[in-house]
Amino acid sequence: MYPQDYHYTKEHEWLKPEGAHALVGITVYAQKELGDIVYVDLPPAGKKYNAGEPFGTVESVKAVSEIYAPVSMEIMELNQQVIQQPELINQDAHEKGWLVKVKVTNESDLEGLLTAEEYQELISKDQH
Amino acid sequence: MTEASQDLKKTPLHAVHEAAGAKMVPFAGWHMPVEYSGVIHEHNAVRSSAGLFDVSHMGEIEVRGKDALALVQKVTTNNVAKLALNQAQYSALVYPQGTFVDDLLVYRISQDHFFLCVNASNTNKDYEYIRSHAGGNVSVVNTSDHYAQIAIQGPRAIPILQKMTAFDLNGVKYYWFRHLDLEGEDVMAARTGYTGEDGFEIFCAPSTAVHLWNRILEIGGNHVIPAGLGARDTLRLEAKMVLYGNDIDDTTTVLEADLEWIVKWEKGDFIGRPALRKQKESGIERKLVGFEMIDRGIARHGYDAHIAGNRAGSVTSGTFAPFLKKAIGLVYLPVEHAVLDQEFEIEIRGKRHRALVVPTPFYRRPNQ
């Protein structure tokens, strides 16, 4: 369920390296905790963030949840489909539900992220 | 389960919810199901078919005796004397300033016996308040532990429930109730609800709740699904039913909440009447109105409203409405701006988003 080639954060984002860029989204675990997602608020392309800074929000019927930059990054592109159909995040969080395409501006930030194993261990603790 | 949840109260249906995989959350001191299959799915099931809710956390206070009528008449704004036996009314329990102690349903069980259904978080406060005003031949008892409460709501609710009783449920009109036999259990079944749909709220002995819950799901088959507090909240908001702690509290008056229809001036004196009368004569300064978002975004409880650049009020409830498929909410606005088609702005995470005052209820069921 948690792809090996993705990087994860403790705040339940994932980052998938794709050549010179990367895709960023929230995890299957995060969407399940949130429930039905009905709104996504993302910044315009060109905006820059430091690792750990909030860059957008995902809202379910009941709750608002901030999304944090997994690494220092610049927004390249937004997933317009997910803005139109936020339920895609519930249906396919790790693929069609990606949020933004980014340029990683500090490669060494990647070392601070969790592997799939480490992330799964983290959420197994959360569930008990 | 977290450590904190061990201190929470559990309804008789708690184990049923956990076994069914419901998402459980702390609510008003109780460990309650917030969703089963998803808020949107449950919400729309109630609009199109039927949903089953465990609302056993609600409080019950019973007032009996020769002076019971006088006491309930004194502490609430609606006219209890107009209630026939087996009839219910929506009302407000008020402070001398005309603000809310709570909102509640008053059921008249007999000439001298009133049954009050109150908000879970307010039960003890309400009980103490009512008791502090009791005089003469009257007893006030917090009987919350004697009842579980199950609500079945939606267009299929009555046909499903009818299969469980010989009593003709169509003989029970909206805001009336009966004590009847449901699957061999004695219950008090009220044609009331908090969803904007037809249906019943069933008060039963805690020991019978699991049996009744399971039988309703069996008999209803695929026409009814269990629903949680999440859907209950979005359903009530679409129907513009207020929520204590969000839309009304001890700082808002019954008139400001646009609930003058439950204030019966002609019934004689009651607590809060002089203050409300005075406010009626001088005119309220703010009023609760419904809005929908013009710009993209969802307004939530506590967000600031602005008109012409000035802070004008605060959102009290706001959500994405699953049936209407738009962002709606309630807000107190200065009375001169609390009018249909008034445009205003709501601050969402530092940015202003346009909203519009619209007619309420946002949703009204067909054939009503």
Image (spheres, helix red, strand yellow):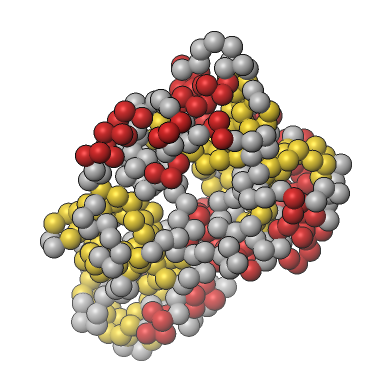
Among the 4 quarters of the image, the one containing residue B306:
bottom left
Q: Residue B333: x, y in percent? A: 25, 53
State the count of labels: 0
Compared across the picture, whether A32 is left or right of A44 comes to: right
Residue at the spot x=36%, y=30% of the render?
B273
Residue B190, how many percent across, how many down?
67, 44
Residue toward you, B5 or A101:
B5
Percent coordinates x, y for residue B79 in the rendering: 50, 34
| A55 is higher (above) or lower (below) than B143 | below
Among all residues in the image, which is located at the extreme left? Answer: B309
Report whether A35 appears left or right of A51: right
Whether residue B271 is situated above or below residue B136 in the rendered picture: below
- Measuring from the top left, give residue B114's x and y in whole percent: 61, 28
The answer to whether residue A15 is visible is no
Depth order, front residue of B54/A51: B54
Judged left or right of residue A74, residue B86 is right
In which image quadrant can residue B365 be found?
Answer: bottom right
Instruction: Give the farthest residue toward the top.
Output: B136
Q: Which residue is drawn at 38% across and 79% down?
A: A83
Q: Which residue is drawn at 31% across and 34% down?
A: B277
Q: Quadrant of the C terminus of chain B?
A: bottom right
Quadrant position of the N terminus of chain B in the picture: top right
Q: In this view, does B191 lie above or below B124?
A: below
